[in-house]
Image (cartoon, rainbow, N blue to C red):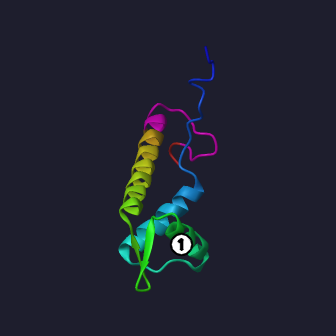
Amino acid sequence: MNDDRYSMKIGTIGQQEIDLLECLVRIDLGQALDARAADMCRRLIEGGLVQDSDDELVLTPAGIERCRSLQHRVAADKEAAKVIADRGIALAGGPRRGT
């Protein structure tokens, strides 16, 4: 029997995923992207999440689903943090209750 079966790490969304979400949301809203996002935009186009149509970036159906997934992840992380805080458990490296 494999003792590692239930040993996966549970963690919050990382900065790279937050950056990805920001790019996807900005593209969806037609907002300007930070110049530093150029490389990520290229990868999003190559990955089929974004389409460059007439010099306008638009999300593909896959991009829309990825954006929704990341938004759900952020919401779930916030809810989990609230539950932990309500239980009086301090998160390592996170804000403390009442601050």
Mark 1 residue element: helix
Above or below, 55 against 65 in this view is below
Q: Residue at x 41, y 54 (%)?
A: 71
Residue 79 placement: quadrant: top left
Residue 55 is drawn in which quadrant? bottom left
In which quadrant is the N terminus drawn? top right
Q: Nearer the viewer, residue 96 or 63?
A: 63
Q: Badge 1 is on which residue?
A: 41
Report the magenta residues as a range. 83-96
User: Badge 1: few (under 14), some or many (20 or more) residues near its Cα, within 10 Å?
Assistant: many
x and y percentages locating residue 8 in the rendered image: 59, 31
85 relative to 54, above or below: above
Q: Position of residue 5 (x, y in %)?
A: 58, 23
Position in image of residue 88 (x %, y %): 50, 32
Pick the front one: 85 or 50: 50
Q: Looking at the picture, does residue 30 appear above or below residue 79?
A: below
